[in-house]
Image (cartoon, grey):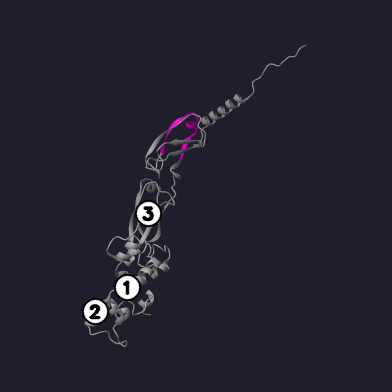
Amino acid sequence: MAKDYYKLLGVPREASEKDIRAAYRKLARKYHPDVNRNDPAAESTFKEVNEAYQALADAETRRRYDRYGDDWRHAEQFEAAGGPRSSTGSRSARRTDVSDASFDFSDLLGSVFGGRGRQRVTVEETIRPQRADVATAITLEEAHAGAKRTVQTPPHPLTGRAGKRIEVKIPPGVDTGSRVHVGGSGELDITVVIKVKPHRTFERRGDDLGVTAEVLLIDAVLGSEIEVPTIEGRRVALRVPAETQNGRTFRLRGKGMPLRRGNGHGDLLAVVKVVLPQGLSDEERGLFQRLGEARERRQEPTAEAPEHGPE
């Protein structure tokens, strides 16, 4: 159905240019996206109002609209060909989408929205970019060092324009649920939502990392030095003192994740897991038996001489 631009602006067909401009300014203030955030209906009306004003603001374009209706943009083609044909076998021109049109918003935006001076501004430039979240998964190593990902943006929710592939730089230290704001091209305001995959060796604990440090029983009893893996793929020395208990945690400073706020790194928390020996020889079993007997003797109460009362 053909649009009635006079009706959209709320003015009669014989309205003056001054009346048309006044009606347009009033409706533009009412439906502008900066005033009606997250209201698709208002944005759609705003586009239609701009489309109507483009046609009626200028005397020549208004004459073309009055004669050709929705096909006013192709008036020059019709007139060069001798005018449009009749509806039977007619050659109707393809309508140009409003997103391809430009308007002079300088006096409106300058006075109402703090515009950027006299310049040509497209309709889509005056519409606030639509926010969109895009999810992506990374490894713990990538979360530690930072990474790059190519993601597919969704279609534009208003125009339906297809999404595109963009490269995203993910900073070090992100965690599951972290949001990396990418920005947009004027149509979509993209935020990438991060998911960090579980790791088979390390457990994320905020900015710290937990790791299991296996210690042989003899080393836990007598003390020793072991090696602990780090997220960078290296190994660091850890001194295990004598008589270290199973489950004890050692903190290795600065060996964890990059801090999300400020400089530096979290810590690496090495949790001791005492590994019991298997396949004992008779000699080894005998040693453990003698150890057990010695421990029992230490726990036996010391014999004391009987106390004698007065005779």
User: Residues at badges 1 and 3 in contact (C-beta under 8 Å)?
Assistant: no
140 is higher (above) or lower (below) than 109: above
User: Residues at badges 1 and 2 in contact (C-beta under 8 Å)?
Assistant: no
The residue at the point 46 percent across, 38 percent down is 270
Type of amino acid at the residue the image marks with label 3: His
| Residue named by callout 1 | 18
286 is higher (above) or lower (below) than 1: above
| Residue named by callout 3 | 181
Indicate the position of residue 44 as horizontal and vertical percent values. Answer: 39, 69
Indicate the position of residue 131 as horizontal and vertical percent values. Answer: 40, 60
How far is the residue under mark 1 from the one under mark 3?
44 Å
Looking at the rendered image, the quarter that the N terminus falls into is bottom left
How far is the residue under mark 1 from the one under mark 2?
26 Å
* Tag in front: 1 or 2: 1
Label 2 sits on a secondary structure element that is helix
Magenta highlight on residue 227: yes
* Tag in front: 1 or 3: 1
| Residue named by callout 2 | 76
The answer to which of 300 and 265 lies nearer the viewer is: 265
Indicate the position of residue 29 as horizontal and vertical percent values. Answer: 38, 66
Q: Is residue 181 visible?
A: yes
The residue at the point 32 percent across, 79 percent down is 70
Type of amino acid at the residue the image marks with label 2: Glu
The residue at the point 30 percent across, 70 percent down is 100
